[in-house]
Image (cartoon, rainbow, N blue to C red):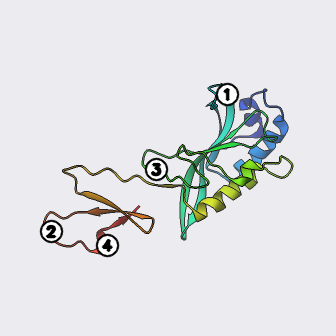
Amino acid sequence: MTLTVRDLRRILPKTYNHRREVLSEISTVLSQHQYLQPVLEKFVFNDGTAKMLINLTGTIEVIYNGKRYNIPVSLWLKESYPRTAPICYLKPTSEMVIVPSRHVNSSGEITMPYLDEWRHTQCDLHSLIQVIMAMFSEVPPLRMRLYPEDSGSAYQSCLYEEISHVKLDRDDDLPISEHNETIC
């Protein structure tokens, strides 16, 4: 579903201080990132206060080791945006696990110098997404969930050079060839 500027104007609350700039930046991002959509939702701040804020939610494409991955994100715009940086989170599916790093905390919040040093005249949503894509192309923020071993389960998990594998144990104790392994 493609939203027009008119649609965006309707969903963007009047409490936003710089509506024209916000609408322009969102329109630019939507024209270049087809899997992001603007959504109006309640955001709860760390101090417990809640506000209805616009966020761009969906996936951004990242290339890691030559393969394409769609990373689910939510980029929240405060009412003072673009004078203040967005609040950015990963939105993993139930099959995904957050991999904390220097740019992603265990809650999935994306932290990086571009956000810490935000200057509204030099920074924008499109550039932010480009920086996130480059950062996650170097260090992926998510991995597939490895299901815990059951006593009766044939699944065994291991970590090998930062690549997660799931190996099936054979009931007949014969070795398993490499093509029976699944790289997550």
Disc 3: which residue: 97
**Gap between marks 4 and 1, in whole Å?**
50 Å
| x and y, in percent, of residue 136 in the image | 60, 59
Q: Nearer the viewer, mark 2 or mark 4?
A: 2
Q: Are there few (<14), some (14-19), or many (20+) residues within 10 Å of tag 2?
A: few
- For image coordinates 26% across by 74% down, the residue present is 177
Disc 2: which residue: 173
Q: Which mark is residue 179?
A: 4
**Gap between marks 2 and 3, in whole Å?**
31 Å
Viewer-nearest residue: 1 or 51? 51
Which of disc 3 and disc 2 is earlier in sequence?
3
Inspect the image, locate mark 1, and give the three-letter code of the amino acid beneath it: Met
- For image coordinates 83% across by 41% down, the residue present is 21
> Contact (CB < 8 A) between labels 4 and 1?
no
> Contact (CB < 8 A) between labels 2 and 1?
no
In the picture, the quarter occupied by the N terminus is top right
**Gap between marks 2 and 1, in whole Å?**
57 Å
Q: Residue furthest left?
A: 172
Residue 1 in view here: no
In the picture, the quarter occupied by the C terminus is bottom left
Inspect the image, locate mark 3, and give the three-letter code of the amino acid beneath it: Val
Disc 1 element: strand
| x and y, in percent, of residue 78 in the image | 73, 35
Inspect the image, locate mark 4, and give the three-letter code of the amino acid beneath it: His
Which of disc 4 and disc 3 is earlier in sequence?
3
Q: Is residue 37 above or below residue 61?
A: above
* Residue 27 location, quadrant: top right
Disc 3 element: strand
Q: Residue furthest top?
A: 49
Q: Are there few (<14), some (14-19), or many (20+) residues within 10 Å of tag 1?
A: some
